[in-house]
Image (cartoon, rainbow, N blue to C red):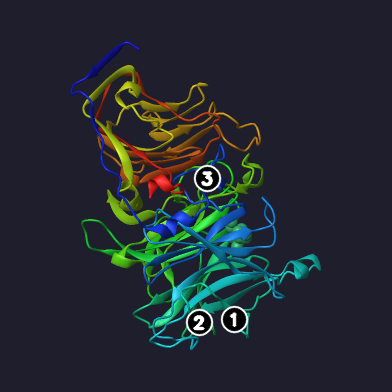
Amino acid sequence: MKTIFIISTAILLFSACEPSSNSRHRKNDDSVYQEVYRPQLHFTPKSDWMNDPNGMVFHKGEYHFFYQHYPDSTVWGPMHWGHAVTSDLVHWDHLPIALYPDSLGYIFSGSAVVDKDNTSGFGTVENPPLVAIFTYHNAEKEKAGSIEYQTQGIAYSLDNGRKWTKYENNPVLKNPGIKDFRDPKVSWHGPSKRWVMILAVLDHVELYASADLKSWTKLSEFGKDYGAHGGVWECPDLFPLTVEGEGKQKWVMLVSINPGGPNIGSATQYFIGDFDGKAFTPDDNKSEIKWIDWGQDNYAGVTYANAPGNRTIFVGWMNNWAYAQIIPTEKWRGGASLARDLSLVNVDGNIFVKSTLVPELLKYSTENAVLSDIKVSDSINLTTQVTFPLSTSIIQGVADAKDFTIELSNSKNQNVKMGYDSNSNQFFVDRSKSGNNAFSKDFRGVIRADRYAKGDTIPFTIVVDVACVEVYFDGGLTVMTNLFFADEPIETLKVSTPGGEINIRDLEVRKLSSIWTKESL
Ligand code: FRU
């Protein structure tokens, strides 16, 4: 370490955590949430396998979170919809499995809506049904050599998602003779007063319309010659957003792709364009590829239906099909990303999605350290300024747009580094010395991401949570989510720069307590 200047001294603030007497959260059994690689701020199932988020819908004060779940093993198998709810996007209550496989097949990914006008007739206008729209995957048909084994089915609930009844005339959308025909995301299209479904079909998406969620007509197709095509298209979403500062509305289409992501394996691309109720018209060039998250561990993410406050809230699966089934967790495998608010930003005429950590999480910090105007030449260890453990923390600041590395490490010198490389104009996360990474050659050490924003400063947010790190650079225009498997807790924070001097303004480190233990409630 050569030179260290800290212009103003660190101020340690011990802010009160939001006390909550909400006993709903206390029924989560603490004892199972203490394993070495168990994130304490992210959603993970109590046990066994989880993949995609499903059926995310807000209804009567609860955000429902369903997820692809195999309750009999820590590897993928016959799919069910696991279920949890939260009122604050932070603390979860696990609920019993919502949907079980039946004679039509496993319950693959899909969505859920509040059918406010009771268009389906499953409920009443006074007690509108929650309707889930999902893919049936018939493994027996698949084994028998048929290619028509994926169809779409629906189910409804009249008691806030606790009990589900499958529609007697399933499937509602039959297979047209194509193997990959799945992951329906349904939303209400106000101007044409009907439901619109976006469906992943091998190498493109298809749009369908319905008046009652039961009978569907094909509208259009998109994507055969657009975007990334290194793998199969899955888990699409389509929603409008307003461009910040302009008031102009654009439509965003999310499409997950596996493999073919920018850093090996699974990832989610997006397109910006217009939607007239029938067809999606992209603004982007055919070859332009935009990624919602460049990390190796964010896949199959979609947005909440019916979110209050006009919010568009995104959650992804925090894993990668390239190694998902062999990550070294024991009781469970797979988790969800933190919830993010999406918005649009115009960067010199090109529109990008911005992801912002939901502010709810910040409310639960228990200790803060505010360090201002840190001038770094070579390297500076900030650990003495931050007297609390960093294993579950949020680090936010603004750095000069010059080369810098932020390093988090533990007593074994296992570390995760992240920062900016001005030469390539890329951000990076380096987990090559983070601990257990020998389980797969596809578990990449260095993950790189393009910088979309311009400008002399880089606002950043880093959330470290035991065994994963989410990094939001440029206020969330470039995002990376990555798992890591360190054996000891993270306790050291260092910032370095290879040459010259950089300035880090407004550095704030917040400690968060586990969302799963009684102390945090
Ligand atoms: C994406 C996916 C979906 C499918 C589900 C099966 O991760 O492959 O396309 O519905 O997982 O679990």
Residue topped by disc 3: 297
**What's under tag 3, amino acid-wise?**
Asp
Closer to the chain start, of discs 1 and 2, is 1
SS category of the residue bearing label 1: loop
Residue behind label 1 places its C-beta within 8 angstroms of ligand 1: no
Q: Which residue: 40% across, 35% down?
A: 426
Towards the viewer: 430 or 220: 430
Q: Residue 248 vs residue 207: left or right?
A: left
Q: Which mark is residue 213?
A: 2
Label 3 Cα neighbours within 10 Å, binned few <14 / some 14-19 / many ≥20: many
Mark nearer the N terminus (3 vs 1): 1
Provide residue 356's location: percent of width, then percent of height. 34, 50
* Distance (Cα) linking label 1 and label 2: 8 Å
User: Mark 3 CB in 8 Å range of ligand 1?
Assistant: no
How many numbered marks does the figure carry?
Answer: 3
Mark sitting earlier along the chain (2/3): 2
Q: Which residue is mark 1?
A: 172
Q: Is residue 419 left or right of residue 300?
A: left
Circles 2 and 3: CB distance less than 8 Å? no
Identify the secondary structure beneath mark 2: loop
Question: Does 495 appear above or below 261?
Answer: above
**Amino acid of disc 2:** Leu
Whether residue 463 is situated above or below residue 401 in the rendered picture: below
Real-space Cα separation, disc 3 to disc 1, in angstroms? 33 Å
